[in-house]
Amino acid sequence: MGYFTETGGTSGTGGGDYPAAEDGVYTCRMKDIEPCQMGSFDDPAVMEDKYRFVFETIEEMDENGKPYRFNKITGRKHGHDKAGLTILLDQMYGRRLTAEEFANLDIEEMQAKKWRVNVEMYQNAKGYDQNKILSVKPLGAKGKGMPGAKPVRTEPDEDENSDMADPFSE
């Protein structure tokens, strides 16, 4: 049985005293997925069950040698196009997971992978700098907006088109 079909907590690695990183793409490992509760958008007094995905940099460190830590909080519903959990997992796996694949996701496998986490810094309502995760892709993924996904332009072979008339010549 996968993590998302079980109930209960994990090690609780989110939060803490971690400085905000500059805008950019960071190579990270997923540290944990923590069940948590937050106030509802409509009524902060009503608590809703959420997941906190915790990513930690493995190459970039702050001035004290500590890794940066980024959190992405999602709801617990998967499958709807606008559900945060669906959007995040679609990014991470490059496609929509079936209900069976989702139910059998292996958190240890997710933690073993390296991820490219795109973040931006913002200032929260209390005036503290924080990071917002914009996207999470597997390291080495080549796609729109990812390093290494450059089109290659090749010059045509002159012999190949030598018998064709140039339609733009005068």
Image: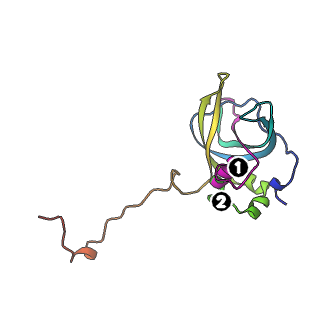
Which of 44/50 is in front?
44
Asked whether residue 158 is drawn in magenta, I would say no
Asked whether residue 72 is drawn in magenta, I would say yes
Q: Quadrant of the N terminus?
A: bottom right
- Number of numbered labels in the structure image: 2
Which residue, as the protein is rendered here, is positioned at the far top? 127
Q: Secondary structure at mark 2?
A: loop
Which of 69/41 is in front?
41
Q: Circle 2 sits on which residue?
A: 96
Position in image of residue 124 (x %, y %) = 65, 27
Left or right, 170 with respect to 76, comes to left
- Amino acid carrying label 1: it is Leu
The image shows residue 144, relative to residue 20, as above or below, that is: below
The image shows residue 154, relative to residue 113, as above or below, that is: below
The region drawn magenta spans: 63-90
Residue 131 is labelled as: none
Which badge, 2 or 1, is on the more N-terminal residue? 1
Q: Residue at x 26, y 72 (%)?
A: 158
Q: Quadrant of the C terminus?
A: bottom left
Residue 85 is labelled as: 1
